[in-house]
């Protein structure tokens, strides 16, 4: 009579994931687009920014993180990590 927990391991067809050496953030939020040259061009369209300067130029930047969530992401990504 057996008591306790017993396991039986079986092989799987799954392979280990390939790890990358880069990461891409996809962030949805609010930004002070009224500060950019053409605010209409920055609303409801994807923006690709490869640097903090590009992100700030495309979306505007203020330190009001409570109202502008993308500014908080720009700050954290470029100053803390």
Image: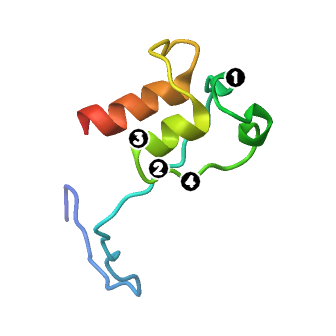
Measured in 3D between alpha carbons, the distance from the residue under mark 3 to the one under mark 4, in whole angstroms, is 11 Å
Q: Is residue 9 left or right of residue 68?
A: left
Q: Nearer the viewer, residue 24 or 39?
A: 39
Left or right of 38, for residue 58: left
Instruction: Using residue 52 as the reference point, say whether residue 11 is left or right of it.
Output: left
Secondary structure, mark 1, is helix
Q: Position of residue 48 (x, y in %)?
A: 56, 53
Q: Residues within 10 Å of mark 1 (few under 14, many from 20)?
A: some
Residue at x-position 37% and y-position 29%: 75
Q: Between marks 4 and 1, how big is the CA–CA gap?
A: 19 Å
Quarter of the figure with the C terminus: top left
Q: Residues within 10 Å of mark 2 (few under 14, many from 20)?
A: few
Q: Nearer the viewer, mark 4 or mark 2?
A: 4
Q: Which circle's residue, 1 or 2, is located before the other in the chain?
A: 2
Q: Are marks 3 and 2 in contact (CB under 8 Å)?
A: no
Q: Could you tell me which secondary element the residue under label 4 belongs to?
A: loop
**Disc ID at residue 16:** none
Of mark 4 and mark 1, the one earlier in the sequence is 1
Asked if disc 4 and disc 2 are in contact, CB closer than 8 Å, the reply is: no
- Dot 3 surroundings within 10 Å: few (below 14), some, or many (20 or more)? some
Write down the residue under mark 2.
Answer: 25
**What residue does disc 4 label?**
48
Name the N-terminal-most of marks 3 and 2: 2
- Quarter where residue 1 is shown: bottom left
């Amino acid at each position: 009579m057996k008591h306790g927990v017993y396991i039986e391991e079986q092989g799987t067809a799954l392979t280990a994931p390939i790890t990358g050496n880069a990461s891409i953030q996809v962030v949805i939020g609010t930004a002070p687009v009224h500060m950019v040259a053409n605010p209409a061009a920055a609303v409801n369209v994807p923006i690709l920014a490869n640097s903090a300067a590009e992100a700030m130029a495309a979306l505007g930047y203020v330190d009001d993180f409570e109202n502008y969530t993308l500014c908080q992401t720009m700050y954290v990504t470029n100053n803390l990590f």
